[in-house]
Amino acid sequence: MQNKLTHLTRIIPELAQQEIMPRFNQVGFTFKGDGSLVTDADTAMQRAVIKELNKRWPECPCLGEEMTGDHQQGLLDSENQGLWILDPLDGTTNFSSGIPFFSVSLALVQNGEVRLGLIYDPVRDECFSAVKDQGAWLNGKRLKLNGSSRRELDQCVTQVDFKRLPAELAMRLAAEHPFASQRNFGSGALDWCWLATARSQLYVHGGQKLWDYAAGQLILLEAGGCANSFSGEPVFSLSLKPQSIVAASHQHQLQQLMDQYFS
């Protein structure tokens, strides 16, 4: 697995700098059936990454965000030695609007669990990665959450995607403002990484897709963080169904939030 990661931490940044950054602020966008955006950068990056993965590891197919739903489901249903999960450009709205906060997310699933994850921020040249049971890293430096002085909810910087929350929960959080501060940056994959680096302490999202959270959740967990769904179940599921997320840099913070808003 480390050999795979070594190769990917070299090639994914190279491909992102070739396929994504030259198009930043240079291309238009179109709307997909679900109302989300897609640009030439999304499709070009997906083609380039899949080509590289097929060349190196042909035994493992790749499920990309820009594939059709039927194609994606077919890959999930197929028996194989592993499955890559790719979001070639997470944060397309930011990208197409000239906001410099977007990323590439790639995960490897084997035997029903995420074994490897990599998320690359081409603007800041930050490469976050993790291997199951071996740790998480930022540009080769190990990530390790050791607790935080921001232990109580009213001390935490929290990333909240209000758009996708149930209306009652969104209204309650907005009215009660239980956190020290809240943010929403627009790239779900990077949100996980910023939590794993203690740039925030809590994360709440009402519905991420598999390619949004597969790599990020592994990075957070391997850094020492924790996460579950709104109902307290594990986040990861090899399914196209959106998943709710409550995540934290420390179990104490997660439990406070769950007790107050999700019990």
Image: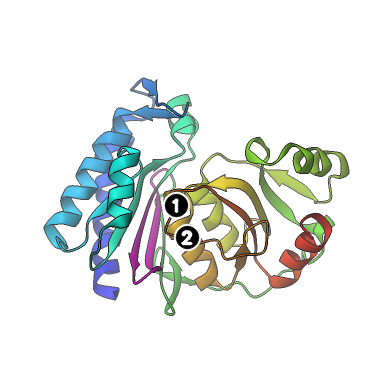
The N terminus - image quarter: bottom left
Q: Quadrant of residue 185?
A: top right
Q: Residue furthest left?
A: 55
Q: Of 261 and 189, which appears nearest the observer?
A: 261
Is 250 left or right of 113, judged from the image as shown?
right
- Label 1 belongs to which residue? 210
**Kind of residue at disc 1:** Leu
Q: Mark 2 is on which residue type? A: Ser
Rounded to the nearest angstrom, the CA distance separating label 1 from label 2 is 8 Å
Q: Secondary structure at mark 1?
A: helix
Q: Secondary structure at mark 2?
A: loop
Q: Furthest-right residue in view?
A: 176
Q: Is residue 115 highlighted in magenta?
A: yes
Position above or below: 40 against 89: above
Which of 180/110 is in front? Answer: 110
The span picked out in magenta is: 105-123
Q: Nearer the viewer, mark 1 or mark 2?
A: 2
Q: Which residue is mark 2?
A: 237
Q: Position of residue 186 (x, y in %)?
A: 55, 39
Q: Are marks 1 and 2 in contact (CB under 8 Å)?
A: yes
Given residues 109 and 130, the one toward you in this image is 109
Q: Nearer the viewer, residue 77 or 166?
A: 77
